[in-house]
Amino acid sequence: MDVNLDNITAYCTRHSDSEDDLLKELARQTHLKTLMPRMFSGHLQGVFLSLISQLAKPDRILEIGTFTGYSALCLAKGLTENGKLITLDNNLQTSLIAKDFFSKSLYKNKIEFISGDAPKIIPTLAYTFDLVFIDADKKNYALYYDLVFDKLKSGGLIIADNVLWSGKVLDLATNKDKGTLNMQAFNEKVANDPRVEKVMLPLRDGITLIRKK
């Protein structure tokens, strides 16, 4: 029997919660209107994010990297009644799609989109966050981690996406490009941080779930 990663992912997807209609349409529009649709979280990862958020019941979520809004809509499902999700991005084209779908969702009054450079915006945010999702430019992952850490409450969660970087982090002798080296440096930073508990999962392109002690 031929068992590969694609088959396993398909099996896992079939045995997980289905996408709601809005997420299905957003997935379709992302594939139709963007040059790199693989950047969006997708069904299986979306269910994971949704369940983590619903378990955490956050009052405040910070998302760094909006793309077309799929992950934000999944994370918003766990917000408390008066909760809020702030999502940051500087891509005007994809943010138009995101804002359109936010306006159609049940969470339209709970999601705030801020356009601009995240390293400049994060220090200005006067919130304590319960959950942070990092899914933006890989060169700044370590910086984002440092910028949000003191804004994250004790027991709060950081979720970092793309930590396996298409498997390139497994072979640094061959893959010496900046993206791979930056991601490897981030992974080592988190792995050696005594202030947190963490687990790296081989979900999609790799995701690390981090809990601040």
Image (tube, rainbow, N blue to C red):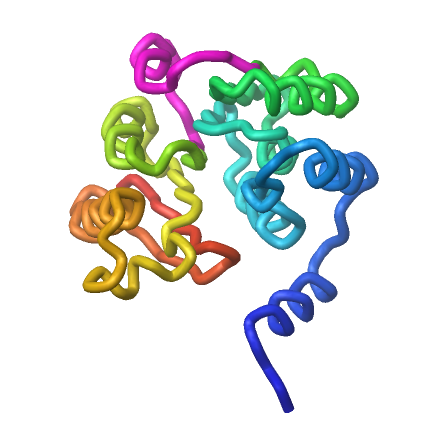
Q: Nearer the viewer, residue 78 or 69?
A: 69
Residue beneath the point at 75% across and 47% down: 19
Residue 49 in the image: x percent, y percent? 56, 44
Q: Position of residue 87 (x, y in %)?
A: 51, 22
Closer to the camera, 55 or 7? 7
Task: Answer with left or right where residue 95 lies relative to residue 63.
Answer: right
Residue pushed farthest bottom? 1
In the rendered view of the protein, which quadrant contains the N terminus?
bottom right
- Which residues fall within the magenta stretch? 113-132
Residue at 36% in and 12% down = 121
**Residue 80, position in %: x, y?**
60, 26
Q: Residue at x 24, y 63 (%)?
A: 174
Which residue sits furthest right? 21
28 inside magenta stretch: no
The answer to which quarter of the image holds residue 99 is top right
Q: Quadrant of residue 128?
A: top left
Instruction: Decide: is 178 above or below 136.
Output: below
Above or below, comparing residue 208 to residue 33 in the picture: below
Q: How many marks?
A: 0
**Image height of 51 relative to 63, above or below:** below
Q: Is residue 197 left or right of residue 110?
A: left
Q: Quadrant of the C terminus?
A: top left
- Asked if 122 appears above or below 144 in the picture, the reply is above
- Residue name at image x 43 percent, y 51 percent: 207
92 vs 212, nearest the viewer: 92
The image quadrant of residue 5 is bottom right
Residue 128 within the segment the image draws in magenta: yes
Residue 29 place in picture, x, y as percent: 75, 34
